[in-house]
Image (spheres, helix red, strand yellow):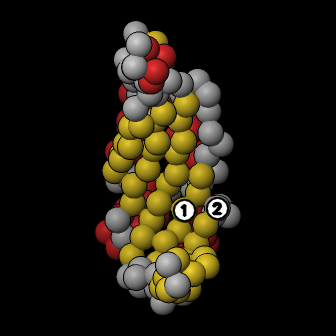
Amino acid sequence: MAQVERSAACLRIHGEDLDPGEITRLLGVTPTYTTRKGEKLGGEVGGRVRIAKAGMWSIEASERSPEDLDGQIEEILSQATGDPAVWRTLGEKYPMDLFCGLFLGVTNEGMSLSAKSLAALGERGIELELDIYSGGDEDEETGN
């Protein structure tokens, strides 16, 4: 089995009353993206302005090719505090997840996560969310 072609990972913390500045202060790392409930999101879509229904704080790891989700987890978590009390407080107040995109080059690729990565996520109360995007063999793409 071939290794997954490419991976993307982003730690997300969200909540209706989320204050991005508070999250930044608690974790000690500058986010990639933030928004507060009620803020305008980007430009108009279909002639309408989108408004944030909740606050969001997130930090992205650099994309990896081939996939290196363990490295991306380390990249994100090594920047933030390791204090379990901070993570426990955040987890009690807000949903947190590590949103991962896995991009297959062909139809059968695989990956694994180390026990160290799984433990680091679990200790912090971070849910793992995987979006897997299908690759295609050349024969499948061309219909041959």
| Residue that carries the numbered disc 2 in the rendered image | 32
Q: Is residue 124 above or below residue 134?
A: below
Residue sitting farthest toward the top: 1
Q: Residue beneath label 1, please?
A: 58
Q: Earlier in the sequence, mark 2 or mark 1?
A: 2
88 with respect to 68 (left or right): left
* Residue furthest bottom as drawn: 38
**Image coordinates for residue 101, horizontal then vertical, percent:** 46, 42
Q: Give whichever of 100, 48 is nearer the camera.
A: 48
The quarter in which the C terminus is drawn is top left
Q: Amino acid at mark 1?
A: Ser
Which three-letter amino acid code belongs to the residue tagged 2? Thr
User: Element at badge 2?
Assistant: loop
* Alpha carbons under labels 2 and 1: distance apart: 6 Å
In which quadrant is the N terminus drawn? top left
For residue 134, the mark is none
The answer to whether residue 3 is left or right of residue 59 is left
Please state the total of marks drawn on the protein image: 2
Q: Residue at x 61, y 79 (%)?
A: 43
Q: Residues within 10 Å of mark 2 (few under 14, many from 20)?
A: few
| Number of other residues with Cα within 10 Å of mark 1, as a class: few under 14, some 14 to 19, many 20 or more | many
At 60% from the left and 77% from the top, the residue drawn is 42
Taking depth in this image into account, of 81 and 8 the one nearest to the observer is 8
**Which quadrant would residue 140 be assigned to in this image?**
top left
Q: Quick check: 66 above or below 60? A: above
Closer-to-camera residue (50/99): 50
